[in-house]
Structures are given as C-alpha cells and as structure tokens.
Amino acid sequence: MRIGVDYYPEHWDRALWAADADLMQETGVELVRLAEFAWCRLEPQDGVFDFAWLDEAVALFAERGIDVVLCTPTSCPPMWLYEKHPDIVQIQQDGTPIRLGIRGHRCVTNPTFLEYADRITVEMARHYAGNPAVTGWQIDNELEAYHCCCPHCTEEYRAWLTAKYGTVENLNRAYGNVVWSGEYSAWSQVAPPVGTYPHAWLNPARMLDFYRFCSDSVIDFINRQAALLRKHCPGRPVTTNVWFCEYMQDFYKTFENLDFLSYDNYPSATVPANSEECYSHAFHLDLMRGVKRGPFFIMEQLSGGTGCWGPMGRQPLPGMIKGFTLQSFAHGADAVLHFRWRTATVGAEMHWHGLLDHSNVPGRRFREFADLCSAVREIKPLRDTAIKSDVAILMAFDHEYAFKIQPQTNGYYYLEQLQRLHRAFTALGLNVDIIGQHEDLSGYRIVCAPEMYVTDSAVVERLHRFAESGGTVILTTRSGVKDEHNNCIMAQLPGPYRDMVGAHAEEYNPIGYDSTPIVFDDGAVMDARQWCDILVCDTANVLARYNAEYYKGSPAITRNAYGTGKVYYIGVVGTQPVYDRIARTAADEAGLDTVELPDRVELVTRTGDGVRARFVFNNDDQPKAFALDGREVALEPFEMKVLTD
Ligand code: GLA
Ligand code: ZN
C-alpha cells in the first residue's frame, strides 16, 4: 500500500525538480510515474535519443528512496513524425483524419507508427534495464478501442474476419447480410463501418464484431509493447492504465498477459442529493479488482477540481482526497498515485487541478494529502489480507458493446443494473466481487448475472451448474436475447435461461423514461422503470407483480427452485429499493452474515493470518454514528476507520 504521484519534469523548470522531490520525500510519497507524454523530448529528432534529462529526474527520486514507474510515450508521437508520415493518424468514421494538436491520435495498427513506437520502446527499455529505480512500466496512456477506419485497420479487419469466418458466405450467414442487400460477394467489399449516421442503421452483428476487432487491435498493440519491455528490461512488472470511457477495450483480455491492472480513478466531487443516484466509486474499484482477481494500481487519482475540456468543476470536499484513496486501498489497490503533483501552468490541462495549485504554495488539499500519507503507514501491515466475497456479479464486454450498438430503451444502460445490485449487496456489509463472466464460480454463494444479453453457451452452462449444485443465481431482464453474433434467438425469453428461471416472458414492454408500480407479496409497492417483462410462471413463484398497465397482475419478479439452488429473475429495471429487497431476501436465504449500516457507509472485510480487519468508510458529507460488531463507530464525512478484532 503505497502513495505516489504523477509528475511531469518536462513541464517544469529544472530548478523546481529537486525541491519537488524533497517535498515528496518529506510528505511520504513512495512512487512517481513519469514520461507518458514525453516522446518529443526523448527523441527530439528521428533516431536521436535524449535520456539525460529523464536520467536526472529518475536519479533525484532514487536518491530520495522514491520508486519510478516509467511509461512508454507512444500516446503522443512527436511533430516531426507526423510531418514525415502524416498517414499515422486515425481516420474517423466520417472518413476524415483526426486533427493534430491533441493526443492519442495515432493509429496503433499503422506499420510506420509501430516501427517508431517499437524503436522508442526498445531504446527506453534498454536504457533503463540496469537502473533499479525504475520498478515498473506503464504502456502508453489510457489506450482505447478507437474505431479507426484507416487503410491499415481495414486490412487488419478483413484479416480478422477471414480468420473467424473463412469465407464471405459464412460471414453473410452469421450477420444476416441478406437484409438490405448487404451480402458480400468478395472480401474486398468488407470495410469498417463508416458514415456519419448512427450505429442504429448498421447491422448489429457486423457492429459487434467491429467492436471486438477494435478491442483486439489495441490489445495486440499492448501485448507487442509488453513483449518488448520484458525482453529489453526484464524483471519489471508491466501494466497499462484503463478507465471507463466511450470505447473501452475488453479489460479481461487486456490484462491477461500483463502483470497487474491499473485504473484511473476520478470519483465525483459532488455528493448526489437524490438517493437513486449512484454515490460511490466502490463499484469501479471492485470491478477493477475483479479483472485479474487481485491487487491493482490506481495510476491516477483525483487530487483537485477537474476542468479543461469543459468548464471547471468543484474542488473535492474536505476529506475526499484522503477518504477516496483509503477507500481504494480497502477495495484492493496496492498503490494509489495522485494526478497530479502540481497543476500545470501551461497546456490544455492547466485547469485540471493537482495536489498543489499554480502558486506552488501547499494549501488545504496538499495538507490533506500529507495527512493521507501518514494514515497509509498505519494500514500497511494489512496489505496482504485478502478480500473474500460470497457474492459475485458477472460482467462482459460483449454486453457492453451490444447495448451501445442498440440502446434498448430510453435511459437504459448496461452498467446500471450491475451498479444497483452491487450497491444492494454492499449495503448489507458484504464484500462483492465483480468478475468476468468466464470466471470460475466456485466459492461464491450468490452470483448475480444481470443482463446476460449476448449468449455464450459455456456461461449458460456454468450458471446452470452453479444453481443446480446449491448456489443462488440472480438473473435479470434482457438475458438470453441474442446469440453470439448479436442476432436475436428465436425463443421465448429468457431463452437459454428459461428452464432455470422457471418462467418466461410472454411479451415485453420497453417503457423508457416512464415508470410503473409493482407490488410485492407483502403489499410493498415499488417502481419499475425502463423495461417490463410480462412474465408467465412455468415452475417459479411470484415475488412481485405489476400493479398497473394492461399487464396488471402479471409476474414481474420471480424465484425458482433449481436443483438444490435458487434462481431469481428480475423482469424489470427497478429503482434501488427493488434490488435492496431482492439482495436482502437472497442473502438471508443463503445464510450470509450481514450487518446494519447507515446509508452511504461502506464496509470491506479483509482477512489474513488470524486477523479480521473491517474497513468502514463514510461515503457522505454528513457525519455518521452507528454500532458495528458491538462497538460504537463515529465517522466524519469521508472518513475511514479500520477496526481489527
Ligand atoms: C486522464 C489522463 C491524464 C489526464 C487526466 C485528467 O486520466 O490519463 O493524462 O488527462 O485524465 O484530465
Ligand atoms: Zn487505423
């Protein structure tokens, strides 16, 4: 559990470097990340390398016992490279090249770019192989599965499809290309989906493969860099930093060959007044821990008010800088690096605030950061404790992509139901893992499988076996809708899950921004939003029925006994109380050890050799007082306490 910062020596006068390093050391910084955008300084001319300035910076940190994570600078090729090879930029879906002056605009399949990217990577790796201060590598920065339509991507895309389908006839069949006369008669006709019209006009099967291809392309680039780093700078762990963005590559595949995951964590600095709104970043943290099922880095952490591509936002409230970092450690982060040490005085991001303001005079946020550094020293002994969870939530990028391609109804988005289930179970004080849908389910008692939209038969099979042998499965609406190509399955929903659910939908009603009441067996009335599956029970019992509309009285939520286990089916998108109620029922039924927590108080239980540590965190701007394990606990806004037995 280490605290670090993101630092840009190339942005600052050299006279500041030593003082910065001194202050870092004095404050308790143990790690710095350097150089992810510094290509123009590392290779100022084609084939002319200059590592002297970076050596100097690395040495300043090393002398002060601060470890360095170096980055490959391939996110921002230098201007001379664009001048020589203007074709290395991405081509957007409207056919126009991305304009220069920003970052991340190179195409990662372009062979010329790859040649140069390989060369700078190898040069850096060799140069730092003998330097023990460099303890790890970050590949590029926030790579995304961009939808590039350049000639190289077109060629790669064809090759990817040829490898998958063999012939255009197979491809036509898989995609249903007969619709609108979309059948290909030769591979030369196959190209990335271009045009300015919305995705909705394009064949969803074609689009899903295109998303998968774009994800694979960027992962190939990551693996290529990882191989070079490992070869030329052996023994240093390699990672890349991801975030929740528009074009996410498949995180599960991204990190298969990397040593650990890194995530950029920017929780909101405002506390939502509406209790329906998601207030916690714990979901993201649990999801990131679940990718490699182990500790991860926060490579960038909120340090000040945001702003630069939009108007500036509020400063983090007192307690947030310390609290959100401790929350990250509780959920499995092994290092948290703050973005950034000092707010830039130049460049596009001069209004994205770091720990220090433009003045360079330590202020409120910096003092809180210093306090955080001391607090971390105290929890370090708990580093090797494990987060064991009885509850898992399944996630997959196929669903994320398919819902993006075809929004289901107004207001619907994939991660919402995962978030609501996560919130419902964590509110009971339970640890929750969010894991890839292909993961082994053994060891869990309850597996939430929300919106299993794009069907993978191995996953269907595993969920059946899990329930059959005594587990609880919670399935939701929009499951079993599509086959693996993103075409509709000709069966009553939830298709391949129908037997375990013990109910089927006779019809569904996408109600968008409207809501409609559902009533539980004890008379409790709650709201369904966005979607209504009008269910008929085969063998299941009804937990809630619709209380309005032409399907008043029809089942909306059911529970079925399957093998020695149980299967819940939530046929609506609910408001939060719906998920809270199902989580409570399922947890009690499974005999899980739950606790009462005040609203917005979170608990992570970590266990080790004879130790049980309860990390309790107040994710609210109001103080809280409550009893836990027979003890009175008082928490200030955004305060974390660790209670050990
Ligand atoms: C991202 C990037 C950083 C910086 C921050 C804040 O996380 O990785 O380089 O742009 O956002 O804007
Ligand atoms: Zn391209």
Image: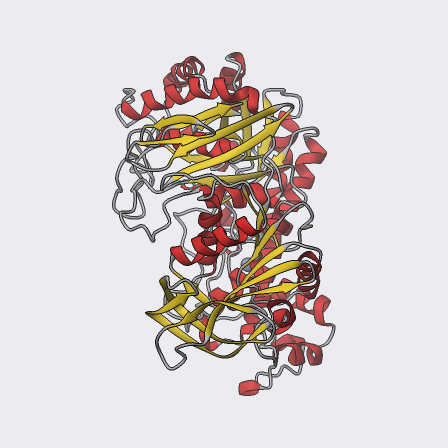
Residue 242 shown left or right of residue 496 in the figure: left
Say if 247 sits above or below 378 in the image. Answer: below
Task: Give the quarter the ligand 1 occupies.
Answer: top left
Colour approach in the figure? secondary structure
User: Can you see residue 35?
Assistant: no
The outermost residue toward the front is 522
Q: Please tell me which residue lies in front, 315 or 235.
A: 315
Residue 416 sits in quarter: bottom left
Image x and y of residue 562, in percent:
66, 64
Residue 517 coordinates in the image, percent (x, y): 35, 68
Q: Quadrant of the C terminus?
A: top right
In the visual, does 274 lie left or right of 52? left
Closer-to-camera residue (571/293): 571
Q: Residue at x 52, y 32 (%)?
A: 42
Q: Position of residue 243 (x, y in %)?
A: 48, 46
Which quarter of the figure has residue 625? top left
Above or below residue 355? Residue 283 is: below
**Residue 479 image offset from top left, x and y in percent:** 56, 67
Residue at 57% from the left image edge and 66% from the top image edge: 210
Q: Nearer the viewer, residue 612 or 116?
A: 612
Q: Relative to 239, is 56 above or below?
A: above
